[in-house]
């Protein structure tokens, strides 16, 4: 039987030495039962030096906390953001039934663990819930302030899920997606369908875009806390996608209500549906009427796809073998 009083954690790291060490320290101080660490490979000297410092800090933590199990896997080659995250989740859930996933650009306090513990137990058997999230981008919003809500989108800055639900997510991320009609002018559907196609074809290095398309289409949900519990500080020059401090980056961390009151909040004020999704679509993803033309613009993808000879996301994942990794 899965225990939610103490659960394992997966940390995905690459190049941010200081941020990584901070996340690992927070995970230890928050009482993680086991910590898995996945480090993507590199052929760049500067990043290699950062990774050596990360491994050195890991070993110092092992020496300081001998009873804490820290399992580390490092890729021999650079897999890229999408393949590295997916393969690390495959590795993690081959060993664990449930766990928290953290990237190396996050800050949080132990209230995140309390919410994950509550949500893991409460929604384990709810097939409409695919993840428990630690980030709330709308804790200052009048409609959502102080309320648990359920967007039909993945909120993956500090999130947890179960082995069986990760299996469903992975299938959706890697399987084909039907392209929209050339004459379709629905900005939201076009945004996600074309984005998922681009990621699956290897034009975009992303795993969360196909997941968002699938969750929206299949009406699966994230459970979002009544207050923001995770701060994303990943806007440095070492970031993969974001280099400036734009919303919703760097939101302050709020105070989680007592766990005993979360069930009351769930019954009294939880929100889901099109109004909640619309906030994410407009405020977080920036979808506007111009995305109604996404299908027309995507016709250029074929040219780009041929020019760069991209391998599909699925093909790249098939090439990943356990022999590609070192256990440190």
Image (tube, rainbow, N blue to C red):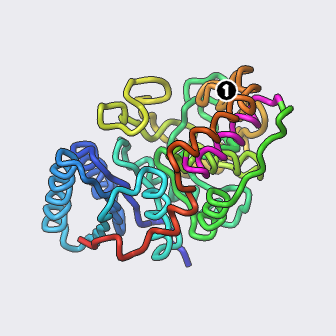
Left or right of residue 25, residue 214 in this image: right
Residue on which disc 1 sits: 287
Residue 133 visible in the displayed image? no
Q: Is residue 32 above or below residue 218?
A: below
Instruction: Name the residue located 71 percent from the left edge and 26 percent from the top edge.
Output: 291
**Residue located farthest toward the bottom when viewing the structure as drawn:** 1
Position of 162 compared to 179: left or right? left
Q: Quadrant of residue 244?
A: top left
Whether residue 229 appears in this view of the structure is yes
Task: Find residue 32 and report its horizontal and vertical position in percent.
Answer: 35, 62
User: Residue 324 placed where, x, y %?
Assistant: 35, 71
Q: Residues within 10 Å of mark 1 (few under 14, many from 20)?
A: some
The quarter in which the N terminus is drawn is bottom right
Q: Which segment did they paint magenta?
A: 185-202
The relative height of residue 87 versus residue 327 in the rendered view (above or below) is above
Element carrying mark 1: loop
């Amino acid at each position: 039987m899965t225990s939610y009083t103490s659960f394992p954690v997966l940390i995905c790291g690459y190049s941010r030495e200081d941020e990584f060490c901070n996340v690992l320290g927070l995970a230890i101080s928050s009482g993680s039962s086991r910590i898995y660490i996945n480090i993507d490979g590199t052929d760049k000297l500067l990043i290699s030096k950062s990774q050596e410092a990360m491994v050195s800090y890991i070993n110092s933590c092992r020496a300081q906390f001998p009873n804490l199990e820290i399992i580390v896997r490092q890729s021999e080659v650079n897999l890229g953001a999408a393949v590295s995250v997916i393969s690390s989740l495959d590795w993690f859930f081959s060993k664990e039934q449930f766990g928290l996933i953290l990237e190396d650009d996050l800050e949080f306090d132990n209230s995140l663990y309390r919410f994950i513990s509550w949500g893991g137990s409460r929604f384990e058997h709810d097939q409409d819930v695919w993840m428990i999230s630690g980030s709330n981008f709308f804790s200052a919003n009048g409609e959502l302030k102080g309320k648990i809500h359920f967007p039909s989108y993945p909120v993956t800055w500090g999130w947890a899920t179960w082995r069986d639900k990760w299996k469903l997510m992975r299938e959706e991320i890697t399987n084909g997606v039907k392209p929209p009609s050339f004459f379709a002018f629905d900005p939201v559907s076009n945004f996600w369908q074309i984005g998922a196609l681009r990621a699956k074809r290897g034009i975009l290095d992303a795993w969360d875009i196909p997941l968002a398309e699938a969750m929206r289409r299949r009406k699966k949900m994230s459970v979002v806390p009544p207050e923001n519990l995770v701060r994303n500080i990943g806007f440095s020059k070492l970031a993969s996608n974001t280099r400036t401090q734009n919303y919703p980056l760097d939101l302050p961390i709020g105070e989680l209500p007592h766990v005993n009151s979360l069930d009351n909040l769930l019954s009294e004020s939880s929100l889901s549906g099109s109004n909640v999704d619309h906030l994410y679509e407009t405020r977080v993803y920036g979808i506007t009427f111009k995305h109604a033309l996404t299908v027309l613009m995507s016709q250029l993808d074929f040219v780009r796809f041929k020019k760069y000879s991209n391998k599909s996301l699925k093909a790249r994942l098939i090439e990943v073998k356990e022999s590609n990794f070192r256990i440190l």
